[in-house]
Image (tube, helix red, strand yellow):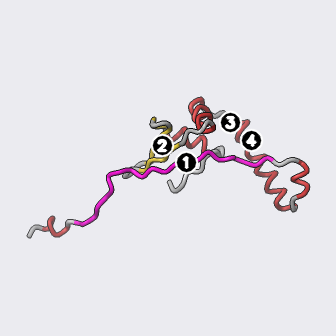
Amino acid sequence: MRYSSKRKQDVTVSKTPIEVAIPLQEPVKIYTAKELAAMPLSKMNEAIAAQEAYFIIEHTTQMGGAAVAIRHAMQDGAVLIQVKEKSRTRYKLNNEFVEPRIVRQLEKRGLVKLGGK
């Protein structure tokens, strides 16, 4: 018996990719002054810090045109799908593949949450 026949493993790998729908999220809740005043101090400080961080990211960096188009499509009800294949992860919107760098722009702003890269 050959060595290669002894080494054969009985591992079956699914040929079909795993698809997961990624919903659009609200990045940061913006609180009014009255809501902030009613909170405990520690929670109020966290909320203010989160709002400031979101404001800085949103207003000091520009999101590309493709990312803006995807954001508007998702706001209109389109679903972003994460397709996990053997060794790579791709994204598609309306059955068209989207570049991962564009999806990362949305993730950086907190608009989508990508699970386990």
Q: Which residues are magenta?
A: 9-30
Amino acid type at mark 3: Thr
Q: Secondary structure at mark 3?
A: loop
Rendered location of residue 88, percent (x, y) = 41, 48
Q: Secondary structure at mark 4?
A: helix
Of badges 1 and 4, the one in the foreground is: 1
Q: Earlier in the sequence, mark 1 or mark 4?
A: 1
Q: Is residue 10 above or below residue 56?
A: below
Dots 1 and 2: beta carbons under 8 Å?
yes
Q: Is residue 26 above or below residue 66?
A: below
Amino acid type at mark 1: Ile
Alpha-carbon span between mark 1 and mark 3: 23 Å
Residue farthest along the left direction in this orientation: 1
Q: Counting other residues with Cα less than 10 Å from the Cα at mark 2, is it few (<14), some (14-19), or many (20 or more)?
A: many
Residue 53 lies within the magenta run: no
Rendered location of residue 98, percent (x, y) = 49, 37
User: Quick one: quadrant of the N terminus?
Assistant: bottom left
Q: Which residue is mark 2?
A: 91
Q: Earlier in the sequence, mark 2 or mark 3?
A: 3
Of badges 2 and 3, the one in the foreground is: 2
